Image: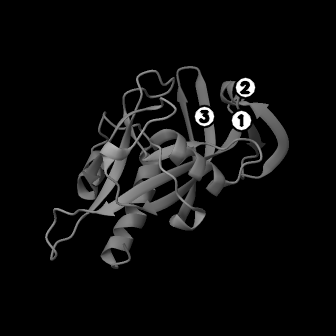
Amino acid sequence: MEYFDVLDENGNKTGEVINRDVVHAKGLWHKSVHVWIIREDKQASKQASKQEILLQKRAPNKKVYPNLWDISSAGHLAAGETPTGGAIREINEEIGINVLEKDLEFLFTSKESFVYKDVINKEFDDVYLLKLDIDINDLTFKDGEVAEVKWIDFADFVEMVNSQSPELVPNWNLYDKLCKVLNDRFDRGLL
């Protein structure tokens, strides 16, 4: 059974620790981490280098948004867990790679909520960037939450977001924020 720290509407801990099912049944605020993995496209020419982003396809047995493409790695924080600790744990559990805290770059926190069937999800998502060139054939899906992964050109991801592709988990607000931050960094040559 997973337990979460309950948060107030401003993202502050209330002191309550409640199990996941109750948190989602009552729509209580809690914390999650999202890690977006990017790399430079090796096939692009030197004059027009492009960035790729790693997407994961949620397993068909997932309770929420099965079989849809999603964040490189994400998950809820366990009670008492730090955001970077949770990010490192999720990356290892979901796609089988080990990273260090220094490898993660914090981008922003996004306040998000949605209802999916009987799940009321209200969370504060700490969003991180991880620059890592990995061969997807070397990845292992330890916890069974991920069906597959793929590298996609960042411009193609932006198009999927702009068209609200039915293949993506509908986190449109969060994706918009991410695309703006990354496009700004690409334009300024920071990535």
Residue at x 61% of width, y 29% of height: 120
Which kind of residue does numbered mark 3 sit on? Answer: Asn
Q: Where residue 74 sits: x, y (%)? A: 52, 44
Is residue 116 found left or right of 190 in the rendered image?
right
Q: Disc 2 designates what residue?
A: 22
Q: Secondary structure at mark 3?
A: strand
Q: Amino acid at mark 2?
A: Val
Above or below 78: residue 153: below
Q: What's the distance in space between the residues labelled 2 and 3, CA to CA? A: 11 Å
Q: Answer few, some or many: residues within 10 Å of disc 3's Cα (few below 14, many 20 plus, some between 14 and 19).
A: some
**Disc number for residue 19:** none
What is the residue that sits farthest to the bottom in this orientation?
Answer: 188
- Residue annotated with mark 1: 28
Give the camera-side residue of 22 and 138.
Answer: 138
Q: Nearer the viewer, residue 61 or 96?
A: 96
Measuring from the top left, give residue 5's x and y in whole percent: 76, 42
Quadrant occupied by the C terminus: bottom left
Residue 164's place in the image compared with 188, above or below, is above
Residue 183 appears in the rendering: yes
Marked residue nearer the N-terminal end (1 or 2): 2
Going by the numbered disc 1, the residue's amino acid type is Leu
Asked if marks 1 and 2 touch (Cβ < 8 Å), the reply is: yes
Residue at image position (33%, 62%) is 39
First of labels 2, 3 by sequence position:
2
Are there few (<14), some (14-19), or many (20+) residues within 10 Å of tag 2?
some
| Residue 53: quadrant of the picture | bottom left
Residue placed at 41% from the left, 37% from the top?
Answer: 169
Q: Is residue 171 left or right of residue 33?
A: left
Spatial separation of the CA atoms under disc 1 and disc 2: 8 Å
Residue 125 can be seen in this image = no
- As measured in the structure, the alpha-carbon distance from the residue carrying label 1 to the one carrying label 3 is 7 Å
Residue under label 3: 121
